[in-house]
């Protein structure tokens, strides 16, 4: 554990960002370490922290429209990879077909987020219905398959050689600890027993990034029962409870939902009644200096940028300040009430993240970094 050098202090004019009636308004930037769970500071700028004039070099924010990716493949272990590091990877999978083989990830836990659709998941532990907005945590080595009721889209987050757990309640600044009783577990029910047969079934197993196949003369999902404290669990963003309060400054860490050793998965859910027109709820300009940030936008109107739609994703490497686009800052953060309806999944990674080279050009918004250039914001 780092023994941080902490010197609480104050220098110069520290005008709260929410005071939009000031003669000399400032733009507040929150700087934090260790995913905003370490020491932090607020810097009050005279100009927007994201108001750069030009950009050059490989370090840049990027945006993707995952809705433009092609469906498939049949095996989710080989779905399109979006992002990777030495300790995690993110894949995006589209399917409308019943899986006729099982999948098993031997490289690490898999956290599945259901972006679109509904259906049934069958696994070693039984039958689990799913719908849009569900997180499904598949422990390492679990055999599973899905039967979609129609078109479905999933984001698959792998904790390579690692496991997902819950965040330490002591680090959730302003947040409410997640109650494990909110999780749903699979059932050994009639639907599970009905899918058991004596046909030949394959299990595709991913280990060290390569897929091998086991073939059985029966369905390996043949459990008659199970007991213990290890199993597949499900949680929907609608079940998440949040602490609400007028004008509270809550850093993104407060939304932390799952954690692994080197990264965390957070959920942004609709927040109502946290402020009033003319006041900002949080310092939206921020610099998370120890983390690369990936955000997948699930539904709603995204208050930080009008051009971002459901099914899109953004990647902000550490070193770049984050913040809203000028038009969104004016219309949604200053002049309009602050109630939100956005839902997004955020990954904060200590390890440097690399965008996968296989993403087709048509799925990336190449000019994303230029949308801030020469921006002018007035309050």
Image: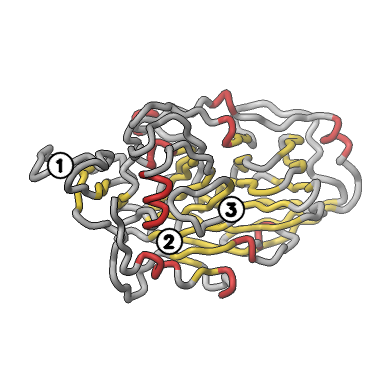
Q: Which residue is mark 1?
A: 14
Query: In whole angstroms, how far apart are the C-alphas of marks 1 and 3?
Result: 37 Å
- Residue occupying image coordinates x 51% and y 50%: 159
- Determine whether label 3 and label 2 are within 8 Å by CB: no
Q: Is residue 358 left or right of residue 257?
A: right
- Residue occupying image coordinates x 18% and y 42%: 4
- Residue occupying image coordinates x 33% and y 58%: 318
Which of the pair 132/212 is nearer the observer? 132
Query: Badge 3: few (under 14), some or many (20 or more) residues near its Cα, within 10 Å?
Result: some
Residue 16 location, quadrant: top left
Q: Secondary structure at mark 3?
A: loop
Q: Secondary structure at mark 1?
A: loop
Which of the pair 170/297 is nearer the observer? 297
- Residue occupying image coordinates x 63% and y 40%: 134
Residue 274 shows in this picture: yes
Which of the pair 263/223 is nearer the observer? 263
The disc label shown at residue 377, or none? none
- Determine whether label 2 and label 1 are within 8 Å by CB: no
Q: Nearer the viewer, mark 3 or mark 2?
A: 3
Q: Where's residue 191, x and y in %?
A: 84, 34
Residue 227 location, quadrant: top right
Note whether 358 is above or below 176 in the view shown: below
- Determine whether label 1 and label 3 are within 8 Å by CB: no
Query: Badge 1: few (under 14), some or many (20 or more) residues near its Cα, within 10 Å?
Result: few
Q: Which residue is mark 3?
A: 310
Q: Secondary structure at mark 2?
A: loop
The disc label shown at residue 353, or none? 2
Q: Where's residue 164, x and y in %?
A: 51, 41
Q: Is residue 345 left or right of residue 183?
A: left
Residue 136 shows in this picture: no
Q: How many labels sit on residues?
A: 3
Q: Where's residue 309, x and y in %?
A: 56, 55
């Amino acid at each position: 554990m780092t023994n941080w050098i902490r010197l609480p202090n104050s220098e110069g004019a520290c005008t709260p960002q929410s005071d939009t009636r000031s003669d000399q308004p400032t733009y507040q930037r929150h700087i934090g370490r260790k995913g905003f769970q370490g020491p932090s500071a607020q810097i009050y700028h005279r100009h927007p922290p994201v108001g750069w004039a030009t950009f050059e070099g490989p370090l840049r924010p990027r945006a993707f429209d995952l809705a433009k990716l092609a469906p498939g493949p049949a095996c989710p272990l080989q779905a399109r990879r979006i992002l990777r590091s030495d300790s995690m990877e993110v894949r995006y999978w589209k399917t409308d077909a019943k899986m006729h083989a099982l999948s098993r990830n031997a490289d690490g836990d898999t956290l599945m987020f259901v972006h679109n659709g509904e259906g049934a998941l069958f696994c070693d532990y039984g039958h689990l219905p799913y719908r849009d907005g569900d997180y499904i945590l598949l422990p390492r080595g679990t055999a599973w398959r899905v039967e979609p009721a129609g078109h479905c889209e999933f984001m698959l987050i792998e904790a390579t050689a690692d496991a997902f757990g819950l965040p330490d309640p002591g680090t959730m600044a302003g947040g409410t600890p997640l109650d494990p009783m909110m999780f749903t577990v699979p059932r050994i029910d009639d639907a599970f027993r009905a899918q058991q047969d004596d046909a030949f079934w394959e299990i595709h197993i991913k280990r060290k990034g390569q897929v091998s196949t086991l073939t059985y003369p029966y369905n390996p999902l043949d459990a008659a029962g199970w007991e213990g404290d290890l199993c597949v669990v499900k949680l929907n963003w609608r079940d998440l409870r949040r602490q609400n309060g007028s004008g509270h400054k809550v850093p993104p860490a407060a939304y932390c939902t799952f954690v692994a050793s080197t990264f965390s998965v957070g959920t942004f859910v609709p927040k109502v009644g946290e402020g009033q027109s003319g006041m900002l709820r949080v310092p939206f300009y921020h610099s998370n200096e120890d983390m690369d940030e990936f955000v997948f936008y699930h539904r709603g109107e995204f208050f930080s940028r009008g051009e971002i739609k459901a099914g899109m994703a953004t990647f902000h490497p550490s070193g770049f300040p984050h913040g809203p686009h000028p038009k969104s800052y004016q219309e949604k953060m200053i002049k309009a009430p602050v109630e939100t309806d956005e839902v997004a999944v955020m990954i904060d990674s200590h390890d440097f993240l690399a965008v996968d080279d296989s993403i087709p050009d048509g799925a990336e918004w190449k000019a994303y970094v230029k949308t801030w250039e020469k921006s002018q914001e007035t309050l």
